[in-house]
Image (tube, coloured by chain):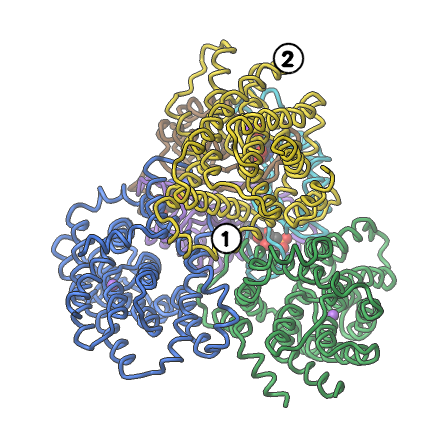
Chain colours: A yellow, B green, C blue, D cyan, E brown, F purple
Amino acid sequence: MDASLILSNILNPPILFFFLGMTAVLVKSDLEIPAPIPKLLSLYLLFAIGFKGGVELIKSGITQEVIFTLLAAMLMACFVPIYTFFILKLKLDHYDAAAIAATYGSISAVTFITASAFLNELGIDFDGYMVAALALMESPAIIVGLILVNLFTVDGKRDFSWPDVLQEAFLNSSVFLLVGSLFIGVLTGEHGWEVLEPFTQGLFYGVLTFFLLDMGLVAARRIKDLQKTGLFLILFAILIPIVNAGIGILIARFIMMPQGDALLFAVLCASASYIAVPAAMRLTVPEANPSLYVSTALAVTFPFNIIVGIPLYLYGINLLWR
Amino acid sequence: MDASLILSNILNPPILFFFLGMTAVLVKSDLEIPAPIPKLLSLYLLFAIGFKGGVELIKSGITQEVIFTLLAAMLMACFVPIYTFFILKLKLDHYDAAAIAATYGSISAVTFITASAFLNELGIDFDGYMVAALALMESPAIIVGLILVNLFTVDGKRDFSWPDVLQEAFLNSSVFLLVGSLFIGVLTGEHGWEVLEPFTQGLFYGVLTFFLLDMGLVAARRIKDLQKTGLFLILFAILIPIVNAGIGILIARFIMMPQGDALLFAVLCASASYIAVPAAMRLTVPEANPSLYVSTALAVTFPFNIIVGIPLYLYGINLLWR
Amino acid sequence: MDASLILSNILNPPILFFFLGMTAVLVKSDLEIPAPIPKLLSLYLLFAIGFKGGVELIKSGITQEVIFTLLAAMLMACFVPIYTFFILKLKLDHYDAAAIAATYGSISAVTFITASAFLNELGIDFDGYMVAALALMESPAIIVGLILVNLFTVDGKRDFSWPDVLQEAFLNSSVFLLVGSLFIGVLTGEHGWEVLEPFTQGLFYGVLTFFLLDMGLVAARRIKDLQKTGLFLILFAILIPIVNAGIGILIARFIMMPQGDALLFAVLCASASYIAVPAAMRLTVPEANPSLYVSTALAVTFPFNIIVGIPLYLYGINLLWR
Amino acid sequence: MHLVKKIEIIANSFELSKILDGLDHAGVHGHAVIRNITGKSLRDGVTEDLDTTMGDNVYIIAFCMPDQLKPVVEHIRPLLNKFGGTCYISDVMEIRSVRCVASL
Amino acid sequence: MHLVKKIEIIANSFELSKILDGLDHAGVHGHAVIRNITGKSLRDGVTEDLDTTMGDNVYIIAFCMPDQLKPVVEHIRPLLNKFGGTCYISDVMEIRSVRCVASL
Amino acid sequence: MHLVKKIEIIANSFELSKILDGLDHAGVHGHAVIRNITGKSLRDGVTEDLDTTMGDNVYIIAFCMPDQLKPVVEHIRPLLNKFGGTCYISDVMEIRSVRCVASL
Ligand SMILES: Nc1ncnc2c1ncn2[C@@H]1O[C@H](COP(=O)(O)O)[C@@H](O)[C@H]1O
Ligand SMILES: Nc1ncnc2c1ncn2[C@@H]1O[C@H](COP(=O)(O)O)[C@@H](O)[C@H]1O
Ligand SMILES: Nc1ncnc2c1ncn2[C@@H]1O[C@H](COP(=O)(O)O)[C@@H](O)[C@H]1O
Ligand code: NA
Ligand code: NA
Ligand code: NA
């Protein structure tokens, strides 16, 4: 049953500390994790997950499954922002619609990491190359979002330069550190893993827990923005992840991913970016309202995914793979 | 003999690094641990100690001993600020007396943590629910202190609001994180402990050591304030902890705590708050002089407790429990 | 063969992350490790290396080898700034020459640490007292540099005070923390080591890796300064380390150091300071141009040493010790 | 370009929320806050290092219309009297942007 | 001592490099940047906490010669119009040092 | 409200203690310091990133009585000449609080 999965998910330290963070804001405690500590934690998580992914990628090698998975990742990263744009256009102007669509086309690394910790908990295996899928899915939505803005708005002086945009999309610090660590994992392999293991593996779960405490604080502070976003966007922020996860699961079934990989893929499809894409959108589509795209991704979709989504998608996968 | 206990206490890395920090200030080295790193370390320590306490509380369950211990903690947290207030009133005005009394009625988590590391060193057991006592003893003194100010001063416009004060007392970040982590430890139990162990246990001693280096810097910088506090307060800051520890030990003996718990309880009684209470006093009793209550707690009582007090109290306990 | 050593050096995570940091700057990624995190990492590294050195020093005791090694360290720390000063004087004014000479007479702790990680990799032993040599070699060059400025420049109002200079040379935070941790390691010995081991040993390699990522960023940002320094200084910054390492190796052979120690000694001789000495020079020889002495040490000598130098010097040692 | 007033307040971070509320009640709804200020005041005479115990100082900057000044002073002065802190006013010219016009 | 103009800009850190480029093109080659500013603007009405997601604000200070002001405003205003942010100008006296003389 | 002078100094953190001593000797006993300033100066022409090696810049603010200005300039100018750094003076109004009156 679904509820038991949800419960076993909720009763993990990372999720409970996420709640603790949210509670702190709600009861107006002055708990805060001062800058730049959250930045340090997120750099660490990207470093550790990228490096581990690289080490495991070199063990598995570039097989047919890897290629299919990465193709599926590319496909979803381009498809999601397009179809959601047309849904969003029903209620919002083109700028906001494109920015939000890009947000949901991209991914949230922390959601991915939380899902992988959940799989570890349950003893379900997953492949290291899913990290490559994570890296691949971060950037395309930014490009797609911009193309949509260009196609659907007609203002003479939209003067952004493609080199800047590509720079922002592919060389922003998250993507860069993740891909770089992945490469280094590939280069150093098993040997590099052993020497770094107490750092990258031993601390990983604890750092994730601590970071989710901060995410709880950040997400709860954004909740008051939701009044301004309106019911349409709140529903969007819950239903679209479910739909995207559903599509992702069907694709995963089709190309016969193992269950663990399928969950991670579903989570990638379902999650929305609240770091890389908002930063890029703020620069390239300044007309869009940041509190719309950040708050939906951060205060609705992120909590939904890590609390309900992850076990829900796994439940679906268990049904289908049986 | 007492001296050998003191020596075996002093020759531990945390205490030695505390001395190193003090030395750095005395010889005017530019060593500093820049903000917000000390904050990160203290958040970590509260997180780790709270979580561990919760895990062990659920193992032991809520027994009669637990209830007696917590009652004793409450009792001392209310009694100490009252009796010390009347001593302090002999020399100081009512505002300063109340603020200092509140400081000594509350506790110092780092002193507690140092004492528990010392017990680990010596292989003496203690119970996880002592962390609950720690959490319980942090706030009451703030309330008692304010009631004393209200009773003994007559200024028409003392316009503080009780909700604000209770907020400050029970939801300040230290108490909140400690209690929150304790709850999460209770909820996740042994299983949560295993996954977080390399983080919460493995690093604990090292982080404590590093943090005490910073405490040494901070305490030494406060030493010059002591000229202004006068001999009365300096004596107060050494004698009152000994008296409080003595009372604590007698109570512990009376309710038959095991030796390890008794030491921790004595340390809680003996220690003075230099974070939560000063912050609260600054807001609610702005008439009191912060350098009086911070400097005595930080530059006298804290070093005294971690260097001399902890082994001294244990010596006393060893005598009585024999 | 040399190349295989270089390769096995380069294929280690710390060096690869150093490259990643440099790459980030070159491709203009916005990757950065915000202040004060690099400071935290460097405090940790000094703390860990000093403490470990102390623990091992007490195990080995103060033997004849120890004394010879420390004498050799003192000798090189005084000799290098003098002879390089006369070379630099050929092209630069006395202020710049003295400042750069002091920089190369002192050492880089991170280069030392990278070399010791490399030795660990290869399974080559080295002695803990090399850390004492590291500490000893940090300060003398500052004093020698100032004496040179005083001897060779004639400006009436050079009004620095020796106490200030000695303070700066011997009590700056790097030297202080390193020596302090060493002392504490000596005092607590094997026992202290065990309790701190998960912190000081377990995380060491990972923190070094992370720190070198930052060093890559910092070094690459300095590369553009090199246009202004000119070819003479760039050649100086590559050749002098090789010469110094060569002298160091000959001395090491002469006093019959084991190979591991010889490499560390060579690396100490070859490396240049980019923290303690520049800070001291900025205050005591403000006439010198910081971008000359910082950029050569940081953007040329440091990368050269950790990438090519360390394996090269080991190759030389292997030849000579055979 | 048009004239506005710049308000600068230095105070302990514990009082930050009270001061911001004061500004808000006085009708000044925009502000910027710089944290982790160290300092020394004539009053206590000792250099205040940032430490874990007594909180950091904050430096609050708020630009406002000249006629908002009086209510600001009325709201802020009691706080400064009670908790300490310093407040200074000066004249600056605002470069109006399209967006700013909308907001003023 | 001689009169110079002080330019103060508060903006999101994402726009920092664009603004510094703008200053540079306007001939103002010196500046100082304070990061990690939190704030609240009338426009969005909510207090902006520093968080991992939306970047921090930055506070840019640049002192320049009075005649550089016009080009600065021309270069900065379009950026403020597009991305948001506020800009204020005031008068200050520079204490010329030997070094400063060389640089101005 | 009464007129005071605002002194703003930007310099490398290594020189901080010397500058604060200078202010102190000149009779200005209060100040606030903002650390971790990045910047660019005409003199060296390159943007200074905060890095582990060369220390950060600091931004020192001190409010003082107009007649303290002369000694301040006398004490600070030699330091700026020697070590670099910039210093600016401007006029501000102080909101006197009860406490401030006592301290001035
Ligand atoms: N004259 C001054 N100039 C600049 N900052 C000051 C001055 N006096 C006080 N401050 C700052 O204001 C803070 C609070 O001062 P006070 O309210 O006097 O305790 C001090 O810690 C300093 O950071
Ligand atoms: N009136 C004001 N006074 C001081 N700072 C302001 C004011 N209005 C806005 N700010 C700051 O400028 C930032 C950008 O404002 P805006 O461009 O209006 O979004 C805000 O986040 C505040 O930090
Ligand atoms: N025109 C300027 N406006 C604002 N800050 C400046 C200016 N010139 C220099 N600075 C700052 O002052 C620091 C020291 O400058 P300098 O003394 O010229 O090396 C620089 O790093 C900048 O942060
Ligand atoms: Na997605
Ligand atoms: Na107590
Ligand atoms: Na050297």
> What residue did someone put label 1 on?
A201
- Whole-percent x and y of residue A215? 62, 42
User: Foreground mark, 1 or 2?
Assistant: 1
Which quadrant of the figure contains the N terminus of chain B? bottom right
Residue pushed farthest front?
A: A322
Q: Is residue A122 above or below residue B15?
A: above
The reply, left or right, for residue C249 in relation to residue B2 is left
Q: Chain of mark 2?
A: A
The disc labelled 1 sits on which kind of residue?
Gln
Q: Residue at image x 33%, y 59%?
A: C114
Determine whether the residue tagged by mark 1 lies in a helix, strand or loop. helix
In which image quadrant can residue B139 be found? bottom right
Task: Where is residue B28? Give x, y as percent.
Answer: 45, 68
Label 2 near ligand 4 (CB < 8 Å): no
Residue placed under numbered mark 2 in the picture: A90
Query: Is any part of residue E95 visible from this angle?
Result: no
Residue located 62% across and 55% down the image: D55
Q: For the point 70% across and 32% down, which residue is it? A: A224
In the picture provided, is C26 more to the left or to the right than A248?
A: left
As drawn, D99 above or below D80: above
Task: Report whether mark 1 lies on the same chain as mark 2.
Answer: yes
